Image (cartoon, rainbow, N blue to C red):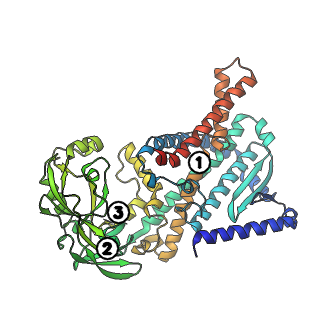
Amino acid sequence: MNPYLIALIVIIAYILLVYSLHKLGFLAKHGIRLVGPIIMWRTSRGKLLIEKLSKPRRFWLVYGAFAKIICIIAMIIIMTLLIWEATIVANIPAERAPGPELLIGIPGINPIIPIGYGILGLIVAVVAHEFAHGIMTRVGNMKLKSLGLLFLVIPLGAFVEPDEEELAKTDKKKRTNVYAAGPATNIVLALICALIFSSIFVASATPVRPNPVVVNVVIDSPAEHAGLLFGAQIMKIGGVEVSNVSEVENISVPDPGEPVSVEFYYAGHIHKVNITSGVVVTQTAPGLPAAMAGIKPGMIIASINDTIVRNESDFKRALSLTKPYQTVNITLLTYFDATGTFEVFDEIKEITLESKLEYYKKMAPELIGPDFKDIGYLGVNTAYIGATLNSPDVVLKKLAHPYAGATSINGFISSTLTYISLPFLGLAPLRSPLADLFVPEGAMAFLPASTFWVIANCMYWIFWINLMVGLTNVLPAVPLDGGYLFKDWLDSFVRKLKKNATEKEREKYIAAITYTLAFLVLMLILWQIIGPRII
């Protein structure tokens, strides 16, 4: 059955059940309130625990100051990221633009978040967030009215309800401690879980075998049509064993368009298939010769300037024999549905190359060394048979040592974004068939591989959800915690700047700036969805 239909049936059944219980008075009898379809269960239980946790008050006061520093840094980072994303919206094709569901961090709605790991991460994130608010409320000697849980089919989270009137009247230091504690705790917890995931779990994993792993299969490529999948481990090509990626780049194979046998390990079994041989375009760069000529990902480059291209080394050599701005003949093969084979693409026979030096000057000047040779540049990424490969050690390195090789601020930022993007790369959660390629060793060797990866994936998703909750809540937009923090900080600034202004005038300035900023934040978020579709 369609998963969306199942979800719809479950939601309808849930709504009918809770409204029936509401009509019967069962919910009210047990202190449960219905807000639309959301169940809000208020209770006094847990107050004693929060009271005990808030006892080391000196520690929590120091933590409150630390939390505000974290929030300021996180606020600057997330706003900078939103503004930067707004500037690149024009470069995002409409078909690759994020949908609204990707901006909603709820498991089952956001397709990136796995339901099981997502629910666990969300529960941990919301409980940690609300308990932090509650602890700082008691540290400031303010009352807690109640605690509770929110449900909408699944637990949406917890809440701690301080006395709003008392919170509004208390001094700013205590109030900002309360606001900052929630998102800061999420961010601290996220960093701790990331450290456990990478430095304890993934660092304890080792590859079962060294053969290269498929990390991407190009649409309409020979690999896709032969059924090669993400996570397959290539063992032999043309009967020759391959133990690393460089061996594939230099391997002796048939002419482009001819079949080649490929043996691979996938999901516990060894498979053997015949795949159309050839170097396949995986990506074209906009504005460069390949894209301008109409070359598409999935096409096989059979020859360049009469040099046959059998493998990646042949492709590099063929281009090394060309000059910038030279017009060369090119032979391309593309898949025809009618015949189910790769045949010559007659619409492109010649192409005028770009200067590799000029391109690198614009895009990667740091890679231009004394031995750099200016040759013709096509503007494509390629992979043999259309399967991008990586060493299993490199896969583990991405997870265990995300900042390895990052020697600059740009490198650090890029590594951070890559680590957060692991779900989009198919590396989180790490599960079969990819997880089958690794086993725990050392201190973690006692764990079965399946249990090992479940715990490791829990750590990553608690990190991921907590980070998203923390960064979202520090946005300077009311009613988020960051919005109230910004409002209090702005009030202090306006009081110093407008010393002669009345209280009413100051409130007017603060309200105007606060709500304008909240509107700007909302527009920056919505622009990521709308912008690519209208530009």
* Mark whose residue sits in front, 1 or 2: 2
The image quadrant where one finds the N terminus is: bottom right
Q: Is residue 491 visible?
A: no
Displayed quadrant of residue 462: bottom right
- Tell me: residue 214, above or below residue 65: below
Q: CA distance from mark 3 to mark 2?
A: 39 Å
| Residue 231 in the figure: left or right of residue 502 | left
Q: Position of residue 327 (x, y in %)?
A: 15, 50
- Residue displayed at 30% across by 80% down: 273
Q: Give the mark nearest the N terminus, 3 or 1.
A: 3
Residue 396 horizontal/vertical position (percent): 39, 64
Q: Residues within 10 Å of mark 1 (few under 14, many from 20)?
A: some
Task: Please give the label number shown on residue 338.
Answer: 2
Give percent across and percent down for residue 509.
Answer: 67, 26
- The residue at 65%/68% (across/down) is 8
Three-letter code, disc 2: Ala
Q: Residues within 10 Å of mark 2 (few under 14, many from 20)?
A: few
Q: Tag 1, which secondary structure?
A: helix
Image location of residue 48, percent across then percent down: 79, 56
Q: Residue at x 51, y 43 (%)?
A: 82
Q: Spatial distance from mark 1 to mark 2, Cα to Cα?
A: 50 Å
Q: Nearer the viewer, residue 11 or 124?
A: 11
Q: Amino acid at mark 1?
A: Thr
Q: Which residue is mark 1?
A: 472
Q: Which residue is mark 3?
A: 394
Residue under the point 48% across and 61% down: 423
Q: Amino acid at mark 3?
A: Val
